[in-house]
Amino acid sequence: MNDRMNSDITIAVVGDFEAERPSHKATNEALLHGADEVGAVCSAEWVPTQTLVTEAGRTKLEECDGIFCAPGGPYRSMNGALEAIRFARERRWPFLGT
């Protein structure tokens, strides 16, 4: 079994990034570490919850390989966070919420 992915992935991180929040910094680090362990290159694209109630926000999700709903709420737009969940569910998109 080949345990290396040898591919690039982009994860949409749904949340309202705040650099001073330890959980937000740790989210970026965890995604990079996990990808490195399987030989992938991962980029995290933070998608503010307010943008997810617009077509532009949903388009951003379509550009990614999976969705992670970030810890450390509250979200600025709960409706936006729920739209991300709906987006993933309706498209059978990889999704993780904590």
Image (tube, rainbow, N blue to C red):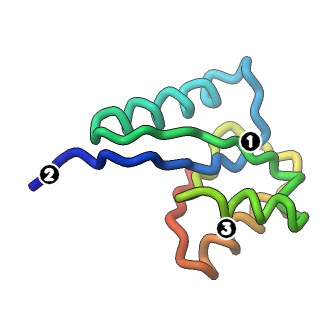
Give the number of callouts.
3
Percent x, y of residue 93: 54, 70
Res 43 → quadrant: top right
Crowding at dot 3, Cα within 10 Å, few <14 / some 14-19 / many 20+, comes out as: some
Mark 2 Cα within 10 Å, few/some/many (few <14, many 20+)? Answer: few
Inspect the image, locate mark 3, and give the three-letter code of the amino acid beneath it.
Answer: Ile
Amino acid type at circle 1 is: Gly
Q: Which residue is mark 3?
A: 85
Q: Secondary structure at mark 3?
A: helix
User: Taking 29 as reference, is 21 left or right?
Assistant: right
Identify the disc placed on residue 2: 2
In the image, which disc is placed on residue 8? none
Q: Quadrant of residue 79?
A: bottom right
* Residues at circles 3 and 2 in contact by the CB criterion of under 8 Å: no
State the CA–CA distance, disc 1 to disc 2. Answer: 37 Å
> Which numbered disc, 1 or 3, marks the residue closer to the eye?
3
Above or below, 18 against 9 in this view is above
Query: At x 53% / y 58%, what residue is drawn?
Result: 65
- Choose mark 3 or mark 2, whichever is in front: 2
Residue positioned most to the left: 1
Quadrant, the N terminus: bottom left
Residue that appears at 50% across and 65% down: 94
SS at badge 1: loop
- Count neighbours of disc 1 (C-alpha within 10 A) and say few if under 14, some if 14 to 19, many if 20 or more: few
Q: Residue at x 29, y 35 (%)?
A: 37
Nearer to us in this view, 20 or 67: 67
Residue at 31 percent of width and 45 percent of height: 6
Residue labelled with disc 1: 73
Q: Position of residue 53 (x, y in %)?
A: 88, 64
